[in-house]
Amino acid sequence: MNKSKHWLKHFEPALYFTLILWVIKSAEELFSLDFHLLTIQPRETLGLLGIIFAPLLHGSWDHLMANSLPMLLLGGLLSYGYPASKWKTLLVVWLISGIGVWLFARPSYHLGASGLTTGFFYFLFIASIIRRDKVSIALMFIAVFMYGGILLGILPWDPKISFEAHFFGAIGGALSAIIFRDQDPKPERKVYEWEGVEDSDEDEEYWKADYLEKEP
């Protein structure tokens, strides 16, 4: 039971963030609010606001639902496996994704949290390659099993989707995995008793022999 609570505790930040997204969308619908000025409008001065606010906004309920589960799972995995670097990673992914979209994306209104989830996915993926410990690899396998399609989400396969946010989010996640690679200690490797037993000098010389003499 304690282990379950420990797991769930690490998912709380992602859960609260997702709830905030739903509260914002509900307020937008309930009070007929217009948030388009808070989206990223590439190379427009007013669009700079979107670097901060765009990940909190979604164009439709379907858009929000499509981002909610990845945010919960990938954000939770990030928090569980990398508690010391999770907030720094969030900040780096948020800023690089937003600034990259503002500088290089197609003229449009860019919004949504998918740049963040893509960044989290690529962080988990690259971190597992760098660290190669059992926890990072396990988290990577879960992420790939559930949302492996994110790997290709950085490509412009659908004009209605801001692949630019995915692309720069991925860059932010990969850079974070490299920059913060030493922030979270690796899990201790269990050493078994037999691993600490040293061979005697006599046995060592015995196995180094090129041949064995046959006893009479």
Image (spheres, rainbow, N blue to C red):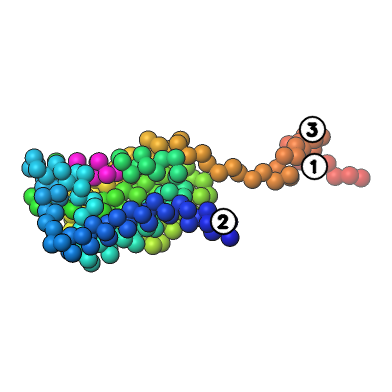
Q: Look at the image and say whether residue 115 sits in the magenta stretch.
A: no
Residue at left 47%, top 48%?
A: 81
**Residue highlighted by disc 1:** 212
Q: Which residue is mark 3?
A: 201
> Does residue 192 appear to the left or right of 166 in the view shown?
right
The furthest residue to the right: 216
> Toward the viewer: 191 or 19?
19
Query: Residue 153: where, in percent of width, then height?
Result: 26, 56
Q: Amino acid at mark 2?
A: Lys
Range drawn in magenta: 93-99
Foreground tag (2 vs 1):
2
* Secondary structure, magenta segment, majority class: helix
Relative vertical location of residue 168 with respect to residue 4 in this rendering, above or below: above
Per the image, the residue denoted by label 2 is 3
Label located before the other in sequence (1 or 3): 3
Judge depth for marks 3 and 2 and give the one in front.
Answer: 2
Q: What is the quadrant of residue 25 in the picture?
A: bottom left
What's the mark number on residue 53?
A: none
